[in-house]
Amino acid sequence: MRIVLTSTDPPSHENYVRWLRRLNPDLDILFLTPGMDVPHTLDAAQGLLLPGGGDPDPALYGKPELRPLCRIDAARDTLEFETIRAAFDRRLPMLGICRGLQVTNVALGGTLVADLPTAGFDGHHWLDGDRRHDLIVLPGTELSAITGEASTWVNSAHHQGADIIAPRLAVSARSNDGVIESLEWAQPAGRPFLLLVHWHPERLPESHPVGDSIGMAFLEAIGNDK
């Protein structure tokens, strides 16, 4: 079972590899980097993980004036826009974490809050480590079914947030101050697994209800789709 991770800096994303292999030691995990053949790489994959990283370019959602607020990774943008389209074409199960949520929302037609502290939300960005805040899971969502939780706490390190939600997506969790923390399909019937979260399950304790349960749901979706 092969999972592909997008990256312009694979050493910085090894924690995702360790997390997935702790959940399933037999996984074949491949980094997809700029210059690789995206369609060919995904043809041999059963799942896609979009990890954290730099900011999507605000020009991609029509707001280039917000660029000074961002740490843009243009190479990741180009790579992941192509990868997301190709993954949807192949109906691959997808998990997006932090930037993964943001770039998928943008790729599907949504927009972002370019800087949460500037917008008045100060408890989410990295500050000598992950921030911790409450999470409210919306009832009736896929996330609720996966975790069995109505509320808990999560770890955040994102200074951007989802603003306008892409038409095919829906909110499945928010922080206690209203920031969108999770997205999923608005109409999941007949669609492949898709879960996008703003927190970092790969850095949560093994016993945390919205950590390993998310990874296991992703892997189970891959197994069921084989």
Image: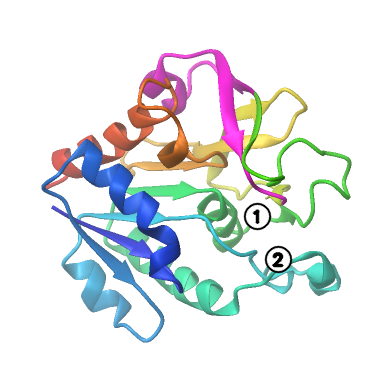
Residue at mark 1: 110
Q: Which residue is mark 2?
A: 61
Tell me which label, 2 or 1, sits earlier in the chain: 2
| Vertical side of 59 occupied by 143: above or below | above
Amino acid type, label 1: Gly
The x, y position of residue 141, in whole percent, is 48, 24
Depth check: 81 or 127 in front?
A: 127
Residue 85, position in %: x, y?
41, 67
Question: Residue drawn at (48%, 18%), measured in percent from left and top?
Answer: 140
Q: Quadrant of residue 40?
A: bottom left
Query: Residue 31, position in %: x, y?
Result: 31, 68
Question: In the drawing, does residue 74 fall left or right of residue 214?
Answer: right
Q: Is residue 93 above or below residue 67?
A: above
User: Which residue lies at the image location 53% right of the left edge and 15% below the top edge?
Assistant: 139
What's drawn in magenta, residue-wise?
134-159
Front-most of 175 and 126? Answer: 126
Q: Is residue 217 depicted above or below 33 in this figure? A: above
Give the class, few, some or many, for how many residues have Cα within 10 Å of label 1's Cα (few <14, many ≥20).
many
Instruction: Report crowding for label 2: few under 14, some 14 to 19, many 20 or more residues within 10 A (C-alpha).
Output: some
Q: Between 198 and 190, which is closer to the camera in this rendering?
A: 198
Indicate the position of residue 35 as horizontal and vertical percent values: 37, 86
Q: CA distance from mark 2 to mark 1?
A: 7 Å
Residue type, numbered disc 2: Tyr
Query: Colour mode?
Result: rainbow
